[in-house]
Image: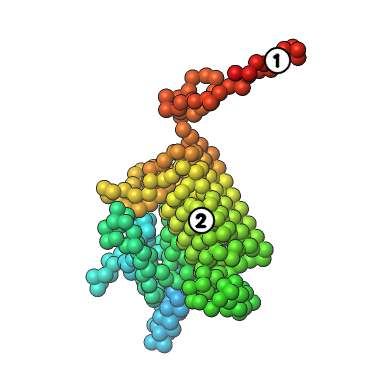
Amino acid sequence: MQAYILETGRRVSPFDDPVGEMPVHNRRLRDHQQSILEDLGCQVETIDDLGQARRQPCLLVYDDVYFTYHAAQRFLAVARRRNEVARREGQKCRGNFAAALPVSPLTQRFVPSFQGRTVQQPDGTSVHAYDLYFLSDWDTATPAGDQTELIRIPHYVTVRRWRVNRHFDASGSYSLPMSTVALCPVQHWSSLLSANILGIPSFVLQSAKKAKYRTATLPMRIVWRAGSLWPSRLRGKTYLAGPGCKVHPTAHVEWSVLGRGVRIGPNAVVRGAVLGDRVEIGPGALVELSTLGEKATVNANVTVRSCVVGEEGHIGAYFTQLSVLGRGAAMCPASGIFDINLRGNISVNFEGRTVSCGSRLLGGCLGHGALLGADVLMGSGQEMPNGCTLVKHPREIVGDLNQSLPANVVRVDRGRPRKRPSDPTLRVQPG
């Protein structure tokens, strides 16, 4: 079957990169789309105009749409089934279909303002429509969305809950929808969080499917790593590790995919994460539902939750969640991002205007090569341009001990050492 990827020309701020270059599970979004379509048996071609999609039937996807393997597989199966029913009934024109998901925690949990367009159904329900199409007989001069019927992709959602302070959620619990079916248009840097977090279950299953040998021997590896048959210890060793990984025996790693040469220190906890090649996690660190790029580093005793970190990124802040770091970006110790708005939804910049992201919880974004210095706090929903550096004011930093000191710094010396006289015959009298 033929599949087309339509280039939209969208660029994501503050990185100023084409949307196809955005990282999803440590690979480009374009590579992610092409890999899934090829796994479905499609011949993939990139186009920049709808008129170039002439082979029918075909799959058409815009280059700013993230979708999991299970979502595309089920959508394709339902579309083919409907066309087969139409052929049996003797209909001359077969249908054109678009992918849709019903409004649910799966589409509303993270930045709902950047989900697919909302469409009211005849039965009174609402769905989110996405630019993933199955086209059998269509007019290339007409937009695909104007000549397609929406198909709800069948899926099952499990909601996991953790206790949190009521400042973060009025219900006192943090809920996370888990499903192998996920779609998300990548239009804003916050959309990368939705794509990477919601797509982790499907990515882990696909990684296990492709690594047949490691998956077949995983039960024996789990027992060997745990050194015990206690269920809690076994659960903490359920991960797929690439060659050269060094995971400390006291580390707790579950439902994660590790690249080559990953190092995880003592007493660290890694849960539901995708770690790239040569990632280093410090002792006592907590990494949950995050994607860390190649050579990324995490300091000891810090918490990283639901973040996307680019290649050679560094997190030294004590607590970071729902934030995006570009290539080579760094957060120094004692820095941080205020990731909650107590009064209402967080506002972000999008296409030159300020819009609401639809959520009270959202961190910030650091562009490529950006640096958030020590003791510097950044507001929620804010973004730093590429190469930007934020540090404390020079007047608050001790530059020269012999000059005037900042107002909040006091110098106290216990005693100055005496200088030895130049004449060796002279002696320094005691006292």
- Residue drawn at x 35%, y 66% is 161
Provide the secondary structure element on which disc 1 rests: loop
- Vertical relation: 328 (above or below) 422: below
Image location (x, y in percent) of residue 43: 58, 70
Residue 269, compared with residue 399, is above or below; it is below
Q: CA distance from mark 1 to mark 2?
A: 56 Å
Residue 339: horizontal and vertical position, in percent? Answer: 38, 49
* Quadrant of res 306: bottom left
Question: Residue 153: x and y, percent?
Answer: 39, 73
Quarter in which the C terminus is drawn: top right
User: Which percent across, then down, holds residue 326?
Assistant: 52, 48
Query: Dot 2 corresponds to which residue?
Result: 285
**Residue under label 1:** 427
Q: Residue at x 42, y 54 (%)?
A: 322
Looking at this view, is 415 or 257 the one in front? 415
Under mark 1, the amino acid is Arg
| Residue 336 visible in rendering | yes
Q: Nearer the viewer, residue 371 or 386?
A: 371
Residue at horizontal 30 percent and vertical 50 percent from the top? 345
As shown in the figure, which amino acid type bears the numbered disc 2? Ala
Q: Nearer the viewer, mark 1 or mark 2?
A: 1
Furthest residue toward right: 424
Quarter of the image that includes the N terminus: bottom right
Query: Image point 69% across, 17% down: which residue?
Result: 420
Q: Residue furthest left?
A: 124
Query: In this view of the protein, can residue 17 be seen by the observer?
Result: no
Front-lying residue, 322 or 227:
227
For the residue carrying disc 1, how many other residues have a C-alpha within 10 Å: few (<14), some (14-19), or many (20+)?
Answer: few
Q: Earlier in the sequence, mark 1 or mark 2?
A: 2
Q: Quadrant of residue 277?
A: bottom right
